[in-house]
Image (spheres, grey):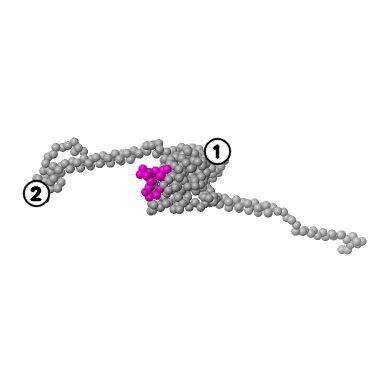
Amino acid sequence: MEFENDDRPIIVKRVRKVQGGHHGGAWKVAFADFATAMMAFFLLLWLLEAASPKEKIALSGYFSDPSAFTEGGSPYVIDLGGGLKDDQFSGENNVESPNSRIQDQGVMLDEETVQDLAAEIENLKFQELRQTLETRIENNPDLRKYKEQIIMDVTREGLQIQIVDAKARPMFDSGRDIIKPYMNSILKAVAETLTGVPNRLSISGHTDAMTFSGTWDYSNWELSADRANAARRSLQRYGIKEAKVAQVVGLSSSVPYDKGRPDNPINRRITILVMNDKSQAKLKAQQEGDVIPVPEQTVDKIESEADALKAFERLRKTMTRKQSADPGLLFPDSGSADPKATAQPKATTPQDDEVF
């Protein structure tokens, strides 16, 4: 069909151009959430692997009954040790025992464990004190050349500081208690270091095994005691209070440093012991003359052994008398023709100590 007079319909074609524009960042947020969740998951796995069985029980108790941590309980899961589900760690319904108990942490400590922990802490303090004194000597040019004559060890009784003689460098005048100047410098450094330490001191003097060639009434015992007292006076002069000194003793050559060579000059020394709590208690008990209790079991054992010895002694005396009255009783004559001579011992009058 034809259209006349240009009445043909006009068809407009519109081409919509779609450009590849921005289509949102929601996927990025989702991926970030996924990465965070994975990191939290792996952290959870790591914590479960590193946690102890007690900590795992505590976590289980928390998620089973959180009220134990919010209503009058501790807000810390591990510190408390769990919820009400587990009485051992909940902090409630715990039965008191003779042993000391730290309820907040669910830890049981007996007296021996507490003493061991205290001893370890005290040993660490002594190690620090030893290091402080060594550093003080090392930083002092006047004392550095004498450091080989200063021997420090942490022992079972405390920190032991020994100032020993050298062959060409004695601490005292020969046979006297006059302190050499360098020895005073060492004692000054020791006193200034120990001034702030609350522990008490035990000072002992030692000599070698060579016989003292002084007067007849003055020996190495008196000399070692006088030198220990001279060291005490020097320490007090440099700041050590008199009440801090627990004892001063002279031990002569009875405790040599070099046991294989009793005449070695190193045996001539002054020992300053910074006493720990255990050694202080022991010394106090000795000074006060405390009676050491003996367990009942030991007493019974001693009494039973004493009774056995008395019975044996009575038996020995009885057999001795019988043997003296008739020697053939214990040692019969094998050549005797009369068997009654050995079978019939002479009658003896029973004595009081023959009765068992």
Q: Amino acid at mark 2?
A: Ser
Identify which residue is drawn at 22% across, 41% down.
313
* The magenta segment: 206-226
Residue 285: x and y in percent read 40, 38
Residue 296: x and y in percent read 34, 38
**Relative to residue 206, is residue 4 depicted above or below?**
below
Of the image marks 2 and 1, the number of the one nearer the N terminus: 1
What residue would you read off at disc 2? 336
261, 65: nearer the viewer: 261
Q: Amino acid at mark 1?
A: Gly
Identify which residue is drawn at 17% across, 37% down.
351
31, 23: nearer the viewer: 31
What residue would you read off at disc 1? 73
Identify which residue is drawn at 46% across, 51% down.
169
347, 153: nearer the viewer: 153
Q: Is residue 225 magenta?
A: yes
For discs 2 and 1, the disc positioned in front in the rendered view: 2
